[in-house]
């Protein structure tokens, strides 16, 4: 299980990184934390011609709060967020999600931008970003643009980030004083990919008022169903469970060795109820 | 504290003490010497090209592009290697009727499981060899895969082996008493269940591997390997490479876990030996994790249909069972893949009194990874079937499962006796261990907790298992069937000039602490501080001839040999001392490295003085004294085919009614492995075994798709138990020494793995009982539990 | 394009400069180039934790880190932890508790334990279990490892009190 041979570049700034991407096109693969990419390469499921290591790109760093937004540089590691004293106060939903992401050593290297760019169906942060209405800033030769998280995760390991673009930062609105946040996931072992999970915010959890919820681990991308959110208005957590399972009927859900699509549909109702009840 | 001195208070008393392992400091400093740490000059790395198909004819192999790759020294196909290495057949004569066709180290014409090697690349580095292996072009003709063991027995199933009339490898039947009449008798309640046990594998953290080093000058092959039975491998290499046994040396250094996985003959390793001989260069192969999942032996994979009947008083009248197990395309060499099924038939019901027992076992070929002996061979199936039915019948008849066990477990004063299957049993303590377990776990309090939980709508369950474990095997296990596997082990004790004891043994260290307990026994019996004992194991060139470590035999057989050798050396040393001191040997003793007066303890001569006199100044010895400061003894179990141990274990679980998740709240074990040589080592081995059993019961399964592709070939897909979900496990002992040896030790390595799945099955079913639901499939994944509850 | 690269890093306190294939991961570099065989290869996909070591003070999977990514970094392996005495208390506790059997997981387990203890981690068993949940041990059942880490964390807390 040794990675196939490749070339390696470590550009010092965003312009150089984008130029390398433009030069090598689909043969290039940006390297952020590498915690998902390296296993794929070791299994020889990914074989890029050149890795573009983003560690030195200053534009991708930083963790700053402005008045009502936090800018998380794409190369911010999970651990940097965990250690950030303002995290609980500004981004409580992110704080709830982080401990569920793999293990200590993985969080020490894995990056926020990498997780968003990979769009693993079971990843926590894409769902969290949808709930928080974050914007993903991507840069390309034409300059940079911002994409709403709701529009960013387009398919199975697919995002709105173009092949010659890089995620620069995620802009996350800070917690709204009148909203509460909830998170629950079900994995057989601590740190495993969830069979089903949910991140949510609401004005009131039980009965539900103004819910925004994204399910992860159940479909190709984080699932947000605005119709369902509207339908849940005024329901109790218990009532919401059945509504979720009904709403997911007919959706193309994941099935693997850990859980069938039926199981995931069922567990989606459970995680929503539990997240609401715990708030 | 006052009172008489106990055995543990005398000098150098180490047997029974929690002595820390001498090798721990080395391993904690990163100074282990594992297989992959070995690098030899001009060493090549072997990478195998493996069949991507479960069943396919190899029509052609084009190696040209691979040969042209940088760093590549050679590329060989299975046919080319077969010219240097003969195939083997995994059958034994005492398993009458077992059949298996010849198996090549690297497939020659047909690949019969996904992952079977079909060619090999040798290169300067593993990475370069992998690059080239990707370019080996194999033209396959896919054949229909035979996957499900039950379907494989259907008359219209495709056959895996030409010339065989079916995919059946072996069948055994046992019929004792008259089960039909017993079940039909008035007042008898019969329960029937179909149990399904998933495929597991060992997932040793250090993968299998070898460095083979052939020296053409002397014609000697040295195989470094990570394994359990060096002498067995020596014979196998000699046979299949056409070398004299004495020209094959097998060395096992630090082993990063084995659990039975590393006691078998794998084509990968044997091919590397042949390649080293062919190329006259050292060849290294270390399986990567995917290769481990695809080629390490798997285990379990049983479907058992079973019935148990109890009479109106609750006495078990008998068990009737039918076991089908899939073993992959060949019977593994040389231990065979029929042993697990054989054990299931031998062990089911063995703790209990019953007159009637009927069992049928069928061992079936299929296009999956080979199955063979892995920790607690057959035990988890036998115990889960019997104790699962026992608690099922308890529920059916409204009896307490502990009461039902008290009534049916063999009485502690009733040995020797035989089990219904005919196993000879002695020195067991089922009743005592059960009582101790009930006290340890506070059974009544747990039942009260369960009632309270149920009132709150929380599903909690308590499950027990009373079990036996096969340990200390005699020649009846393999030797009588023709396998080149020693059932005896040897130990040598040597007193050196400085007064230190150098000991060696044919049992091997896999981390369980074999070397530590051998030192304890030698120091204790001979009479030196343990720091003055140095232990050598794992090298056919230097240790006495013996079987190695498997079937929980290290302490019981290897330990007894060490005891006998230490006693013999002590006798010899005291003879010399008596001559030097002009005293009777009978009045002398050895304590703390010094020959003393046995009665007064007065020091007479230090061992170093004695040894130096013998070695350096023989002129001071009486001319007729011919001192031997070395002694070797061998030991085998006679009178019994195996020395059985027994134990009782229990667990307390909570089943999440909405998700099907099972949380293990508590686990208790009372183990009787006879004399406990080092309680700290035994307890942690029991706990490790329990956790492996929890893995099998809740998490671990090798799953295949309908094409025979292994779906769980990564550690993200094959779930092993990790720290966060595991409970603390309380371990206690009853000590009933085996009367077959002086030491009195029985094995302890497999009990936890053998019994935990039964306890967990019972606990989950106890939790589900208020719903009228039950589950009979392991692992008990959340989805299976929910489906059993009818909630999905 | 050149598929090797020169790197300079600190390993166990010593500066090391080497030219490495860029595809070589950190654990292979340490084991094969520097002959520091204490870090073990268990799965090469970041799950088992056998290759866990400290990079810039944080536990890191050396199988998921390229050697070139460690350029400029400070790497501490089990050999360094032992030689500097940083793991001495844990090593004592592991020995006394028999918190290792085959020893193959031990270097990675120690790296995780060191960050727990040095980071002021508590002696609370569930918290320790969660912290080491990325380190696979097939032998012990984990209990003795938790015992050993709790012993050291507990006595550290006592010393501080």
Image (cartoon, rainbow, N blue to C red):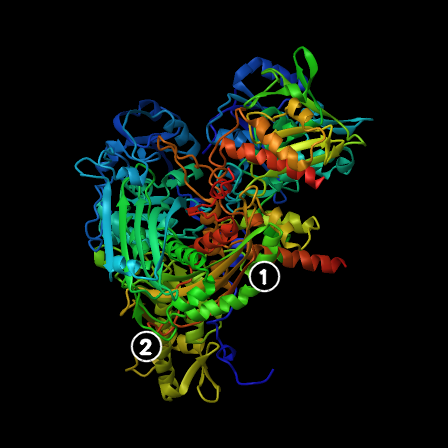
- Is residue B477 shown above or below C52? below
Residue B107 placement (x, y as % from top left): 27, 35
| SS state under label 1 | helix
Which of discs 1 and 2 lies nearer the camera? The answer is 1
Marking on residue B448: 1
Chain name for mark 2: B
* Residue sitting nearer the eye, B765 or B240: B765
Q: Residues within 10 Å of mark 2 (few under 14, many from 20)?
A: some
Q: In this view, does A129 lie to the left or right of A255?
A: right
Figure quadrant of residue A211: top right
The disc numbered 1 marks a residue on which chain? B
Does the image show residue B602? Answer: yes
Res B627 label = 2
Residue at horizontal 55 percent and vertical 14 percent from the top: A25
| Percent position of residue B547, x then y | 31, 59
Lateral position of residue B115 relative to residue C90, left or right: left
Q: Position of residue B446 (x, y in %)?
A: 57, 61
The residue that appears at 64% across and 56% down in the rendered structure is C150
Q: Residue furthest front?
A: B186
Expressed as whole percent of the image width and height from the top left, the position of residue B123 reads: 38, 32
* Residue furthest out toward the top: A142
């Amino acid at each position: 299980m040794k990675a196939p041979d490749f070339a390696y570049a470590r550009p010092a700034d965003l312009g150089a990184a984008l130029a390398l991407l433009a030069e090598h096109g689909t043969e290039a693969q940006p390297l952020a934390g590498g915690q998902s990419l390296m296993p794929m390469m070791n299994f020889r499921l990914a074989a890029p011609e050149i890795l573009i290591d983003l560690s030195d790109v200053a534009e991708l760093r930083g963790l700053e709060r402005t008045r009502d937004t936090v800018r998380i540089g794409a190369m911010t590691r999970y651990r940097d967020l965990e250690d950030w004293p303002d995290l609980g106060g500004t981004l409580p939903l992110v704080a709830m999600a982080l401990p569920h992401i793999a293990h200590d050593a993985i969080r020490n290297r894995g990056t926020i931008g990498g997780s968003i760019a990979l769009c693993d169906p079971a990843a926590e942060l894409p769902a969290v970003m949808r709930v928080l209405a974050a914007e993903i800033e991507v840069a390309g030769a034409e300059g940079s643009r911002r994409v709403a998280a709701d529009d960013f995760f387009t398919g199975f390991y697919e995002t709105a980030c173009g092949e010659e673009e890089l995620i620069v930062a995620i802009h996350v609105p800070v917690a709204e004083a009148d909203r509460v946040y909830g998170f629950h996931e079900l994995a057989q072992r601590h740190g495993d990919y969830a069979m089903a999970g949910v991140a949510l915010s609401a004005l009131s959890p039980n009965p539900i008022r103004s819910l925004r919820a994204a399910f992860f681990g159940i479909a190709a991308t984080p699932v947000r169903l605005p119709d369902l959110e509207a339908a849940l208005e005024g329901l109790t957590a218990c009532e919401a469970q059945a509504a979720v399972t009904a709403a997911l009927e007919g959706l193309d859900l994941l099935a693997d060795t850990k859980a069938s699509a039926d199981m995931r549909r069922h567990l989606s109702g459970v995680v929503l109820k539990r997240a609401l009840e715990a708030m | 504290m006052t009172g008489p001195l106990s055995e543990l208070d005398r000098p150098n008393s180490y047997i029974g003490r929690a002595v820390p392992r001498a090798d721990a400091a080395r391993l904690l400093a990163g100074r282990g010497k594992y297989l992959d740490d070995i690098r030899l000059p001009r060493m090549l790395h072997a990478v195998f090209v493996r069949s991507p198909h479960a069943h396919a004819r190899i029509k052609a192999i084009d190696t040209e592009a691979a040969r042209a790759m940088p760093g590549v020294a050679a590329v060989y196909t299975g046919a080319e290697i077969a010219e240097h290495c003969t195939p083997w057949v995994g059958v034994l004569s005492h398993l009458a009727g077992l059949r298996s066709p010849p198996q090549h180290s690297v497939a020659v014409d047909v690949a019969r499981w996904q992952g079977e090697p079909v060619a090999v690349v040798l290169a300067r580095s593993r990475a370069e060899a992998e690059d080239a292996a990707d370019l080996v072009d194999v033209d396959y003709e896919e054949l229909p895969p035979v996957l499900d063991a039950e379907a494989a027995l259907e008359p219209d199933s495709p056959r895996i082996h030409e010339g065989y009339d079916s995919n059946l490898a072996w069948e055994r039947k046992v019929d004792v008493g008259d089960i039909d009449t017993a079940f039909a008798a008035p007042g008898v309640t019969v329960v029937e269940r179909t149990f399904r046990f998933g495929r597991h594998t060992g997932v040793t953290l250090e993968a299998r591997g070898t460095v083979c080093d052939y020296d053409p000058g002397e014609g000697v092959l040295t195989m470094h390997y990570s394994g359990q039975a060096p002498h067995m491998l020596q014979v196998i290499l000699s046979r299949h490479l056409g070398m004299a046994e004495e020209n094959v040396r097998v060395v096992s250094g630090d082993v990063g876990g084995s659990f039975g996985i590393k006691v078998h003959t794998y084509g990968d390793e044997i091919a590397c030996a042949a390649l080293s001989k062919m190329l006259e260069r050292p060849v290294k192969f270390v399986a990567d994790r995917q290769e481990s999942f695809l080629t390490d032996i798997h285990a379990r994979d049983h479907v058992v249909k079973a019935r148990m009947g109890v009479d109106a008083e609750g006495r078990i009248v008998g068990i009737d069972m039918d076991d089908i197990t899939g073993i992959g395309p060949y019977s593994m060499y040389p231990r065979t893949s029929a042993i697990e099924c054989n054990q299931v038939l031998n062990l089911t019901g063995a703790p209990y009194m019953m007159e009637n027992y009927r069992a049928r076992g069928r061992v079936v070929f299929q296009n999956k990874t080979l199955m063979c002996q892995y920790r607690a061979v057959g035990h988890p199936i036998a115990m889960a079937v019997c104790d699962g039915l026992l608690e099922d019948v308890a529920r059916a008849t409204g009896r307490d499962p502990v009461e039902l066990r008290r009534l049916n477990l063999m009485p502690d004063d009733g040995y020797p006796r035989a089990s219904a299957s005919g196993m000879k049993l002695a020195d067991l303590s089922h009743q005592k261990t059960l009582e101790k377990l009930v006290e340890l776990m506070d059974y009544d309090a747990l039942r009260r907790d369960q009632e309270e939980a149920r009132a709150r709508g929380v599903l909690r369950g308590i499950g027990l298992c009373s079990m036996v474990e096969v340990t200390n095997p005699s020649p009846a296990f393999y030797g009588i069937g023709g396998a080149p596997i020693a059932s005896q082990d040897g130990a040598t004790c040597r007193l050196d000039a400085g007064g230190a004891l150098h000991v060696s043994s044919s049992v091997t260290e896999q981390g369980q602490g074999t070397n530590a307990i051998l030192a304890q026994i030698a120091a204790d019996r001979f009479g030196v501080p343990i720091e003055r004992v140095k232990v050598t194991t794992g090298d056919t060139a230097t240790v006495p001839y013996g079987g190695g470590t498997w079937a929980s035999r290290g302490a019981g057989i290897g330990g007894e040999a060490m005891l006998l050798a230490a006693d013999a050396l002590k006798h010899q040393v005291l003879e010399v001392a008596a001559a030097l001191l002009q005293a009777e040997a009978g009045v002398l003793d050895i304590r703390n490295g010094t020959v003393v007066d046995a009665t007064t303890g007065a020091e007479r001569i230090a061992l170093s003085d004695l040894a130096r006199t013998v070695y350096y100044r023989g002129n001071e010895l009486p001319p007729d004294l011919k001192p031997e400061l070395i002694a070797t003894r061998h030991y085998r179990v006679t009178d019994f085919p195996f020395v059985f141990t027994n134990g009782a274990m229990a667990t307390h679980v909570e089943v999440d009614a909405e998700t099907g998740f099972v949380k293990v709240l508590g686990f208790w074990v009372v183990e009787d492995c006879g004399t406990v040589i080092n309680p700290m080592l035994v307890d942690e081995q029991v706990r490790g075994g329990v956790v492996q059993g929890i893995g099998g019961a809740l998490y671990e399964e090798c799953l295949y798709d309908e094409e025979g592709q292994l779906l769980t070939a990564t550690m993200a897909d094959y779930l092993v138990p990790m720290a966060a979900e595991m409970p603390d496990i309380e371990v206690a002992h009853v000590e009933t020494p085996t009367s077959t040896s002086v030491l009195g030790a029985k094995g302890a390595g497999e009990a936890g793995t053998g019994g935990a799945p039964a306890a967990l099955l019972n606990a989950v079913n106890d939790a589900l009982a208020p719903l009228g639901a039950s589950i009979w499939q392991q692992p008990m994944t959340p989805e299976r539990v929910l489906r059993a509850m009818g909630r999905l | 394009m050149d598929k090797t690269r020169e790197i300079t890093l600190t390993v166990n306190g010593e500066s090391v400069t080497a030219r490495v294939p860029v595809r070589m991961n950190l654990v292979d570099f340490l084991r094969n180039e520097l002959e520091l065989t204490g870090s073990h290869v268990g799965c090469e996909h970041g799950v088992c934790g056998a290759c866990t070591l400290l990079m810039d003070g944080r536990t890191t999977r050396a199988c998921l880190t390229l050697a070139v990514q460690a350029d400029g970094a400070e790497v501490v392996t089990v050999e360094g932890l032992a030689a500097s005495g940083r793991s001495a208390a844990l090593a004592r506790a592991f020995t006394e508790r028999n918190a290792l059997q085959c020893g193959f997981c031990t270097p990675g387990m120690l790296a995780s334990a060191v960050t727990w203890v040095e980071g002021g981690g508590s002696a609370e068993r569930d918290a320790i279990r969660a912290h080491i949940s990325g380190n696979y041990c097939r032998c012990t059942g984990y209990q003795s490892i938790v015992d050993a880490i709790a012993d050291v964390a507990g006595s550290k807390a006592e010393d501080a009190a």
